[in-house]
Image: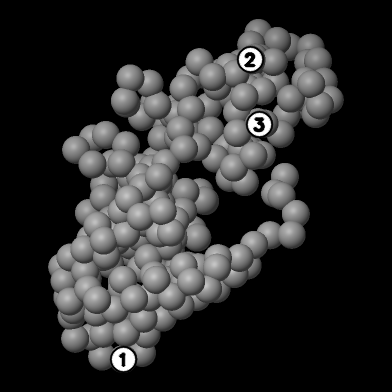
Amino acid sequence: MRAMDVMTTAVVTVSPDSTVQDLAKLLSERGISGVPVVENGTLVGIVSEGDLLRRAETGTERRTARRRWRWFDPGLEEARDYVKAHGQTVRHIMTREVISVDETADLAEVATLMETKRIKRVPVLRDGMLAAILSRANLVRALAAIGREPATGTAGSDREIRAKLLAELNGREWARVWPEEIVLQDGVVHLWISDARPAAEREALRVAAENVPGVRRIEEHTVPVPMFPPF
């Protein structure tokens, strides 16, 4: 499987000129832990909840003891910490050296990258432009979609089936589904559906999937709705 098979295409982004307060509200309201930073369509950084831990407003600013021999260490690290704690825009706190992958990247390569770099998500590029985001949750869903049955299809046919199903659902009011909630593996459609979704909508999603040529089986996975909003 490749990044394009499981990535989240509905990407939430911010501008480098967005305020830190707006960023905090966005992460809290959307229940996400990080977002890409885009300027004029170009990926210029990434920012996460970790960048908001040390803030002057919350009294968590990192403080270091004054050292006597300042000419050996001009305090560059302290200067960066100060900007991170007091800067008022995303530009001041974002990570500029962004680790990204192409949409054709193999999932094994993506998993290795996340593990070695200790990151939770990577932006996915298409022709050098931001196209999607791929998180650890996407990889977990891809793993859950892999069955023990021998493969009878190809990755290409899986992508074609998924594209046809998404096209069928596009524009229908009852088909409120994110693309990453549909995973294909060897002709088996895995639907990740909220337990709060009405039975009629669940049935309609199954019928739509069953009518796509090449589908062997439908597997429905229930995703519980959190009792409390994420912080």
- Amino acid type indicated by mark 2: Gln
Report the residue marked by disc 3: 25
Q: In this view, does 108 lie above or below 36?
A: below
Q: Distance between the residues labelled 1 and 3?
A: 45 Å
Q: Which residue corresponds to the image point at 79% horizontal and 12% vertical from the top-left? A: 68
**Tags 3 and 2 in contact by the CB under 8 Å rule?**
no
Q: Is residue 153 above or below residue 47?
A: below
Q: What element carries label 3?
A: helix
Residue 56 in picture, x, y percent from top left:
77, 20
- Amino acid type indicated by mark 3: Lys
Report the residue marked by disc 1: 149
**First in residue order: circle 3 vs circle 2:** 3
Q: Which residue corresponds to the image point at 33% horizontal and 20% vertical from the top-left? A: 40
**First in residue order: circle 1 vs circle 3:** 3
**Tags 2 and 1 in contact by the CB under 8 Å rule?**
no
Q: Residue furthest bottom?
A: 149
Residue 121 left/right relative to 195: left
Q: How far apart are marks 2 and 1 (CA)?
A: 53 Å
